Image: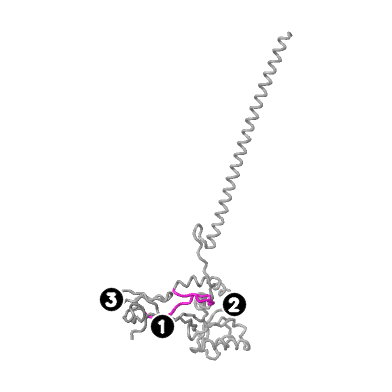
Amino acid sequence: MSDLERDDIEALAQVEDAAADAVIDEADADLADLALDAAAELEQDLELEAAIAETATEAASEAEMVEEGAPADETPVEEDPYKVFRDDLRKQPGKWYVIHSYAGYEKRVKQNIETRKQSLEGGEDIFQIEVPMEDTVEIKNGQRKLVTKVRIPGYVMVRMDMTEESWELVRHTPAVTGFVGNSQNPTPLRPSEAFDMLKSTFELPEEVAAKAAGKGGVAVKGKGKNVPIVTNFKLGESIMIKDGSFAGLPGTISEIKPESGKLTVLVSLFERETPVELGFDQVGPLN
């Protein structure tokens, strides 16, 4: 073989090697692109799975909220401040019964039962005696006065297990005239009835009482409850204005606003009835 032929063969081999390297490089590039595409697809799949998992978690959380009574995507309902008190009433031992007493002797009856239960048989079955009281703010002659009185005169509430001995102890307490209902086999109050009668004894948190004060009552410091306001004024009542620009003129009450201590009074001016807002202390009886 001549030197020329040998050189041609070597040149051809180099060309073939270069071509082979190019093919390999191109294949490696394709493989690299495939690997990158696969990685990108895997990342997208993982992101999708994470999104699905997050959605499922949120749905489960919303379902729990719905089950617990808090509607999803809505403002939570304000919690009933009496809920704890109502739940406690249901958990307490015994049942609530109502007894008659002489009017004005309710507190005396409570004290007598509490004394007798310490020494008489059946006393261990009597757990609690209550005389529901009621606070009101009375406004007379422009002056406010906090008044506490028996909510239902002539009645006392007793929480007890009804046995022959406990019945005897309560029934024969001085100033007690009997149980409400069947005197020999009294019927206990339903939980809702007991709650309604004892509700006035429960003290709300002061901030809740203050918030409720705008609903027809007033929050009294230290009482922890929304106290209703009672006045001696009546709608349609004729009064005499005793202070202000219309002093000396008669009028008729058309609206009473106890929470603000104001009255709307219809006054006859130029043969027409004109509404005038006055304070409780600016009016008095017509005669």
Mark 1, secondary structure of its residue:
loop
Q: Is residue 12 above or below residue 187?
A: above
Cα distance in 3D space between marks 3 and 2:
66 Å
**Foreground: 91 or 42?**
42
Instruction: Answer with mark 2 or mark 1, whichever residue precedes in sequence.
Output: 2
**Residue type, label 1:** Asn
Q: Is residue 208 above or below residue 15?
A: below
Q: Which mark is residue 234?
A: none
Q: Which mark is residue 141?
A: 1
Q: Is residue 172 left or right of residue 281?
A: right
Q: Quadrant location of the C terminus?
A: bottom left
Mark 2, secondary structure of its residue:
loop
Instruction: Answer with mark 1 or mark 3, whichever residue precedes in sequence.
Output: 1
Cα distance in 3D space between marks 2 and 1:
47 Å
Query: Residue 144 location, x and y as percent?
Result: 45, 80
Decide: few, some or many residues near mark 1? Use Cα within 10 Å; few <14, some 14-19, many ≥20: some
Query: Residue 216 location, x and y as percent?
Result: 44, 74
Dot 3 corresponds to which residue?
269
Dot 2 corresponds to which residue?
93
**Foreground: 272 or 228?**
272
Q: Which residues are magenta?
A: 216-234
User: Residue at the bottom extreme?
Assistant: 174
Query: Residue 268 location, x and y as percent?
Result: 29, 77
Instruction: Answer with mark 3 or mark 2, whichever residue precedes in sequence.
Output: 2
Cα distance in 3D space between marks 1 and 3:
25 Å
**Residue type, label 2:** Pro
Whether the magenta-drawn stretch holds residue 225 is answered as yes
Contact flag, marks 3 and 2 (Cβ < 8 Å): no
Whether the magenta-drawn stretch holds residue 245 is answered as no
**Residue type, label 3:** Leu
User: Residue at the front extreme?
Assistant: 245
